Image: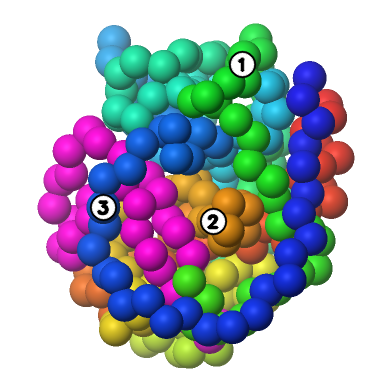
Amino acid sequence: MAVLAVAVLLIAGLACSSAEEGKLTSIEEYPSLVQVENRAGLLWLQFCAGSVLTSYHILSTARCFSGPNYTDRNRRIRAGTSYRGSEGIVREVARVYLHPTFGLLGNDGDVSVVRLETSMTLGDTIQQAPILGEGIYLPYGLQLQLVGWGTTSEGGNRGDNNLYELDVYTVSNDDCLETYLELEDVENNTITENMICTGLLSTKGRDLDTRDEGAPLFYTGVTVGIVSFGVSNGEDNIPLVSTAISSYTNWIVETATL
């Protein structure tokens, strides 16, 4: 089984790019990305994302692998493809490990490690990405890459089946909290130090596509966050909230040996 890589980065400087449009990409560019599929009767539909930790383990959110009707047999992983719901390889879920703090304070601790029934063969389209080391926090205004199969435009319009990447920028957690506290119809709107808020450069926000939950945020090829929650069908002035990897690195590494 492949060893999980942890990256210790020197992170400095603010973003200067102004690109705000999602653009087509491929699994060859982001081979650690996987789809999380949910069983709906006889169909399997992609509704979350994740990333490769080892040949046997996937990293995602706890929200994607929990709930009152959740069972392991109703989830599976599709890896090694740029296209939603087709090609690549499929692996069944053997066991899911949720972080022990998940559910105690809103969406804090929204991280899971998924053990697969059978291993994946690593190659050009299925690879590990290093994860950020414990206790390394990101400055505000840092450009990150969000990659997934969600929509690329405001308003929750249905997307196609292709893979997209989008540049987003870190936002102050204090400003993020203030924004979410003003939203009366949003549950679990607590923002903690274990989260990363991101948005577009001009609006400081980003509309959420729920199919991007669990998708990784990258900085220079290193996984630094996992998309957790936001406001779907909203305006692009509400930040997208992700789980900060560096708050849970040690737990992730330990769990990915089980």
- Near-viewer residue (17 or 161): 17
Q: Residue 203: where, in percent of width, then height?
A: 29, 83
Q: Quadrant of the N terminus?
A: top right
Mark-to-mark CA distance, 1 and 2: 22 Å
- Estimate the x, y position of residue 181 in percent, counting from the top left: 44, 84
Q: Nearer the viewer, residue 79 or 154?
A: 79
Disc 1 residue type (three-letter): Met
Which residue is found at the position 63% from the left and 53% from the top?
A: 222
Where residue 255 sits: x, y (%)? 80, 37
Q: Is residue 87 visible?
A: yes
Q: Which mark is residue 218?
A: 2
Mark 3, secondary structure of its residue: strand
Residue 117: image quadrant is top right
Mark sitting earlier along the chain (3/1): 3
Q: Is residue 11 magenta?
A: no
Find disc 1 in the rendering and name its residue: 120
Q: Which residues are magenta?
A: 144-173
Q: Is residue 119 above or below residue 47?
A: above
